Image: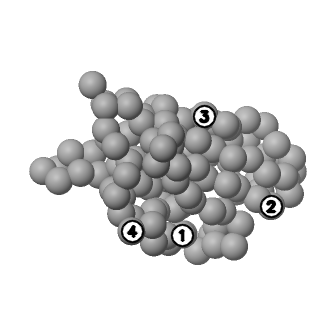
Amino acid sequence: QVQLVESGGGLVQAGGSLRLSCVASGVSFSYHNVKWYRQGPGKQREMVAHIDGNDNTNYADSVKGRFTISRDNAKNTVYLQMNNLESDDTAVYYCNTPRRGGLNYWGEGTQVTVSS
């Protein structure tokens, strides 16, 4: 059974930092695409960071220079380091890994709240 579990969310003041983790079981992150999405209150879900099988990364314009996605294959974990947080970063953050055949695995999310 595939399971993605996010952690590391919480309440932080604007300008602060958090590091989110996504641990996978039943599926390997190694050499596969992994993405972080977020959904803020009243907003659509949006992708914020992506790491591909070759460890190339890309980011939403709104988080470039502030967020960093990385992976630790030995721990089967992907991280999202978030610095200089802003109130607009308040959202539930989800980990996702798409696979061939239309499979798409999601975690249940972790809440990030940034107070101004």
Could you say which is closer to the camera, residue 17 or residue 71? 71
Q: Which residue is mark 2?
A: 84
Q: Quadrant of the N terminus?
A: top left
Residue 2 vertical placement versus 18 (above, below): above
Looking at the rendered image, the disc whose residue lies closer to the viewer, 3 or 2, is: 3
Q: In this orientation, does residue 42 appear?
A: no
Q: For the residue labelled by badge 4, is the local secondary structure a helix, a strand or a loop?
A: loop
Residue at image coords 50%, 71%: 58
Crowd around label 2: few <14 · some 14–19 · many ≥20 (10 Å): some
Looking at the rendered image, the disc whose residue lies closer to the viewer, 4 or 2, is: 4
* Dot placed on the residue nearer the N-terminal end, 2 or 1: 1
Crowd around label 4: few <14 · some 14–19 · many ≥20 (10 Å): few
| Residue kind at label 4, given as amino acid type | Asn
| Residue kind at label 2, given as amino acid type | Asn
Image-based side of 5 in relation to 20, left or right: left
Residue at far front of view: 74
Q: Are marks 3 and 1 in contact (CB under 8 Å)?
A: no
Q: For the residue labelled by badge 3, is the local secondary structure a helix, a strand or a loop?
A: strand
In this rendering, the count of numbered labels is: 4
Query: What is the spatial separation of the Cα atoms under label 1 and label 4, in whole angstroms?
Result: 16 Å
| Residue kind at label 3, given as amino acid type | Ser
Q: In this orientation, does residue 96 appear?
A: yes
Q: Which residue is mark 1?
A: 59
Q: Which residue is mark 3?
A: 7
Q: Which residue is mark 4?
A: 54
Residue at image coords 48%, 32%: 5
Q: For the residue labelled by badge 2, is the local secondary structure a helix, a strand or a loop?
A: loop
